[in-house]
Amino acid sequence: MDELPPAECRHLVASSLLGRIAVFVDGRPEIFPVNHVFDPVTGTVVFPSKPGTKMWGALHWPWMSFEVDGIDPDGQSAWSVLVVGRGQELTAPEDIRRAASLRQVRWAAGPATHWIRLVPAQVSGRRIRLVVEP
């Protein structure tokens, strides 16, 4: 297993279309899939959300996590990136426009959409390589 440098972690988050957030709801952890973007201007993970459990958990607890993973094209290794930090609702129109313009998949967005930003306190990543035994 290899630790990934921060720049590679950011690249992998930016190149992925689907991740998961983990938040606390009523004192227990819950995990939700999110169609996210990486905002290179702020160095944050941003995702759309409708009002409800996911949004409430992201904004009302001091910590949340985001995780994304994948398999490298050669099939010989896989990777995982974890971002831990605090959630904030985007309110500045320029931040919302930038996040919306970065999206590659247009799920769950419309006039009632709120945009949540995960401000990283910690970013870590690992690559696991296939071990071929003789």
Image (cartoon, rainbow, N blue to C red):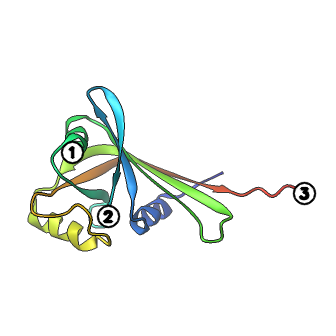
Find the distance from the CA under tag 2 to the CA under tag 3. Answer: 42 Å
Q: Is residue 105 left or right of residue 132?
A: left
Above or below: residue 62 compared with residue 73: above
Which residue, given by chain and number where applicable, does mark 3 sit on? Answer: 134
Question: Upstream in the sequence, badge 2 or badge 1?
Answer: 2
- Give the image location of residue 104, x and y in percent: 32, 72
Find the distance from the CA under tag 2 to the CA under tag 1. Answer: 16 Å
- Give the image location of residue 10, x and y in percent: 42, 62
* Contact? badges 2 and 1 (CB < 8 Å): no
- Residue at 39 percent across and 60 percent down: it is 18
* Contact? badges 1 and 3 (CB < 8 Å): no
Q: Is residue 123 left or right of residue 42?
A: right
Assess disc 2: are there few (<14), some (14-19) or many (≥20) residues with their C-alpha within 10 Å of its C-alpha: many
Which residue, given by chain and number where applicable, does mark 1 sit on? Answer: 55
Dot 2: what SS?
Answer: strand
- Looking at this view, is 46 or 19 the one in front? 19
Which residue in the rendered view is the most extreme toward the top? 27
Going by the numbered disc 3, the residue's amino acid type is Pro
Find the distance from the CA under tag 1 to the CA under tag 3. Answer: 50 Å
Which residue, given by chain and number where applicable, does mark 2 sit on? Answer: 37
Assess disc 1: are there few (<14), some (14-19) or many (≥20) residues with their C-alpha within 10 Å of its C-alpha: some
Q: Is residue 101 left or right of residue 5?
A: left
